[in-house]
Every structure is written in C-alpha cells, then in structure tokens.
Amino acid sequence: MRNYIQKCRLLVGIVVGFLPVLLVGACANSNDEPDYYEAVEEEEQEEEKEEVVEVVEEEPEEASKKYASIDFTHWKVTLPVDEDNNGSPDEYKPSQLVNNGYQSLAPVMPYMYDDTTDGSIVFYTYPSTSTTNSKYSRTELRELINPNNSKENWTLAEGGVLEGRLKMVSMTKDSQSSNRYHRTIIMQIHGIISEEDMAKHNFDSNNGPPLLKIYWLDGEVIAYKKSLKDETTSGDALLETSSATWTDIKHNFGSVGYEPFNLKIVASDAKLSVQLNDGTPHVFQDVSLDKWPYENYFKAGNYLVSTEATAKAYLKYYSLTVSH
C-alpha cells in the first residue's frame, strides 16, 4: 500500500512538473504565430508601397510631355493622300481636329502628329496626291473663318494677323534644279473669288492666285508677293488669274537653317507686313495691293514644291495663331 501511494505521488509530481513546460511551450508557440502574421502583413504593406511608388514615378513622365499651341477651331487640314479614292486629297474639318481629335485620326497620324519632347506638331509630306489647282502635294492647314463654310473669307480692308513659331526638321536634296534642297511653302495668304463676283461673272471656279507665299528654300526664308504686270489694269480684268496679269516680286529674309524661328504676317488695307524673329518687318505697299480684287484666307504647313519621287519634308510648328 505504501509503495502504491509513493508511485501515485511520483506520477503527480511528474505531471505537475511537466505542466509548466507545456505552458511555456504553448506560450512560445502563441508568441511565434503573431510574429509570422506581422511579417506577412509587413511584406504586403511593402508590396503596396512599391506599387504606389511605381504610379508616382509614371506621373512626372506624363507631366514632362509638351504639346504645340495650336487651336484647330478655324483650321482644316489637307493631306498628301487620297484614301477615300474620290480623286482629291483627303481633308479633315475643324470639328474632327479640335479637342486633340487629330491625335486619334488614323489617316491623319502619319502626316500630322505630336512631338511631345519639344512641344511641336510635325507636318510630313511627299509627292503623292495633288489638288485640282496644283500639281504639288501638301500637309497644310487652311483657315476657315466659318468652320462650316469655306466660302466665307476676308478682304484686305478687314485684315488679319497670322503668327507662328516653326522649324524645318528635314528636307531632301534637289537633283532636278539648281537648288541644293527641295523647297516648301510654310505660310500663305491665298486669294479666292468672292461669292458676289462668282454670281456676277458666272465663273466655274472661285480659285484666285496666292497673294503671298513664304518659302523655306536652302535654309532661307523668302517671301513672294503678287503684283500687277501692268499697274494700269483695272475693273474685271483684275480677276484674270493668269501670269499674264499677275507676277511675283520677292524679298529674302535671310537664313534660318534648321533652327526654330518666328514668323508674323500682318495684312491690312493695301499693305502687307512680314516679320522674321525680332527683325525689322518688311512692308509691301503698292498699287497692286490697293487694287487686289480677291477675298483671302491664311494657310500654314508643309506645301512641298516638288514632284521628284525621292522628295520628302518634315516641318514643325510649335505655335500658330490667327486673328481678325
């Protein structure tokens, strides 16, 4: 009996002695589990932090993009292609270009597109589809005072101002003339016969001669202005558009090469003023301007004056504004 009691006391002692060990072990395990979950949570938080950092890093890249300052509300564009096969170069209206619409027009994108590294719009063209009144192709903007009616234009008496900052990027060599490179028209004032004169004379076409053409030629900016061959010409004879009636006089503004430059045209009653950068404006003022019988509209872009198969030109506009 005594031996039995001793055995029971020994067994109880073992159990009682082992309980602290079990409790310590259990506590140790209970302390380990929170450490594990805390580590997982910290790892997930680190991943979330990394994801946030990625988004923050992308924003400055987008913010660093620059865009040209051109409002297309009163401009349509003519392209050097005829993808709709209607026999004329494709055109896109102001309503299709505004609010960055030009950026998503697939037919426009190869010929007029943003360069966000310097805040410009590139105008690319090459000899392809020409207009009815010209054998040359262009990627060029045409002013529309009324975005829905190209027949509404302005007279010299009403006047207008066109200003732009631009740059020739690339021009091919000319193997068919004495010029080193091909030439392109970068700004124009184009004449158009008024609706009144169209009705009066029953003309088939309202196309008039360009009053002012400004070229980039071998790195120089050159203006050509229409003048009467015979300053005594008057009346309806002034509406004769041929070279027998109108010829060109020119002014060379000097070299700009492939650097950005500013160009400003101010049209007023019997007077044209053209200014390159901060130079003294060159003023055309003569009887031919006083007798100019046409209405007018501004044009700006890349009008490549060449049919050579290898010709192509890239021109940039950083800004373009028009006012009346």
Image (cartoon, rainbow, N blue to C red):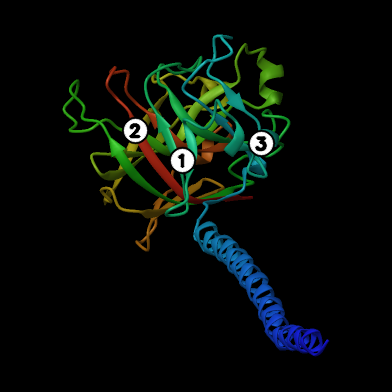
> Which residue bears the numbered disc 1?
287
Image quarter hosting the N terminus: bottom right
- Residue 283 x/y as whole percent: 41, 52
Give how far apart the Cα atoms at labels 1 and 3 are: 36 Å
Q: In this view, does 234 lie to the left or right of 251?
A: right
Give how far apart the Cα atoms at labels 1 and 2 are: 36 Å
Instruction: From the viewer's side, name the closer residue of 66 and 81.
Output: 66
Neighbours of disc 2 within 10 Å: few (<14), some (14-19), many (20+): many
Give how far apart the Cα atoms at labels 2 and 3 are: 24 Å
> Which residue bears the numbered disc 2?
313
Q: Is residue 181 left or right of residue 91?
A: left
Checking the image for residue 18, the label placed there is none
Disc 3 marks a residue whose amino acid type is Pro
Q: Earlier in the sequence, mark 2 or mark 3?
A: 3
Give the farthest residue toward the front.
Answer: 1
- Residue 267 x/y as whole percent: 53, 48
User: Are the residues flagged by discs 1 and 3 in contact, CB closer than 8 Å?
Assistant: no
Residue drawn at (74%, 89%) of the image: 13
Helix, strand or loop at label 2? It is strand
- Residue 23 x/y as whole percent: 73, 83
> Which residue bears the numbered disc 3?
94
- Residue 130 x/y as whole percent: 45, 17
Q: Is residue 19 left or right of residue 32?
A: right
